[in-house]
Image (cartoon, rainbow, N blue to C red):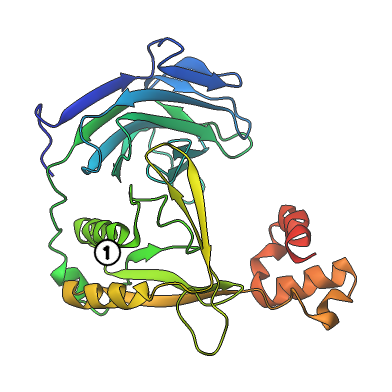
Amino acid sequence: MKLNKHNFIVRIDCIKEYNEQEYFEHGDVRVVDTQIGRYREAEAKPLSRFGYRFTIRNIGKPHVAIIRYPDDKRRYMCIMDGTCYDLTTGIFTDFAQPISGEMLEIHQIFWPRWNDCSIVFMTWGHGEPAAVASIKIYELDELPALNSTQIHNDPSRREFGVQYEDPCGTGASEGAISKDEWIDRIISYMHYTGQKLLVYPIAWYHGPQFPSDREPSDAFDVVVARDRRQYSRWTTQPPDWYSDLLNRFEEEGLEYQASLTLSIFRNSRAFNSKPLEKRFILFQTIFHPAFNTFRNSYSFCLSVIK
């Protein structure tokens, strides 16, 4: 991907101070001096955050945010625009890989749905503060496809793809308003990154997300519109957009794997009659054996299965 002055939109220097129309912060946010340079750091408490406002020229064109951040201690941060999923990603340092002691970069592709945009950095882990040195925004002419044929033809390699937890966010991600627009952009993104597999739900808690003769359909999603409002859509007669997705993927040489999210305990008399402690153990055994290690998930699980 070539970036030049023609594509350049804005550079945000996180060391500088900006006025209240361009910047906000929550918690004890500071500019700090370190051996690898200066950067802005949020408080080491979850939800402490800071954010910037910037303007782009062309709505719907692919853009990239180049985020420069310090890899000098353990961090766990969320990145978002504060309204939808278009800029959403996450960064963690330490934990599973050694600290480099350098400034690193992440390139986040997004399709803005407004000219007036924002980007927010938030601490998500206790003692793991969000921190950023600078952000550059570029508009892209296109997303060139990565030549990944050799990689995908090697059976010894793992599959590499995109997984969606739930099916209600297509109208709030990739800058998309419609399913067709989302399909176009997820295909473009997958080709650009060399990803070949999409894992996406066809049934979510209460029923199929497609027309079904066997089970009542129950399709729900959210659309973030140009007016910055979130509109919920729910129907028992969803369109068969999965057929369009499968046809497009076949044309593009991509693969699709259907996933299911089922609520099997909601109306189970045998399960709901058990004490909460036993319900948690059953839930833990079937779905989340790793929760034996993460005890702080206990209260969350109880709230889920009540």
x and y percent of residue 258 in the render?
Answer: 42, 77
- In this picture, residue 174 sits left or right of residue 29: left
The residue tagged with tag 1: helix, strand or loop?
Answer: loop
Q: Please, is residue 15 above or below residue 283 in the view?
A: above
x and y percent of residue 10 in the render?
Answer: 24, 23
x and y percent of residue 112 in the render?
Answer: 30, 39
From where the camera sits, is residue 157 visible? no
Q: Quadrant of residue 254?
A: bottom left
Look at label 1 and name its amino acid: Gln
The residue at which mark 1 appears reads as 195
Taking depth in this image into account, of 184 and 165 the one nearest to the observer is 184
x and y percent of residue 19 in the render?
Answer: 42, 9
- Residue drawn 24% across the image and 77% down it: 247
- Residue drawn 44% across the image and 38% down it: 79
Taking depth in this image into account, of 46 and 96 the one nearest to the observer is 46
Taking depth in this image into account, of 34 and 171 the one nearest to the observer is 171
From where the camera sits, is residue 172 visible? yes
Where the N terminus falls, by quadrant? top left
Q: Quadrant of residue 302?
A: bottom right
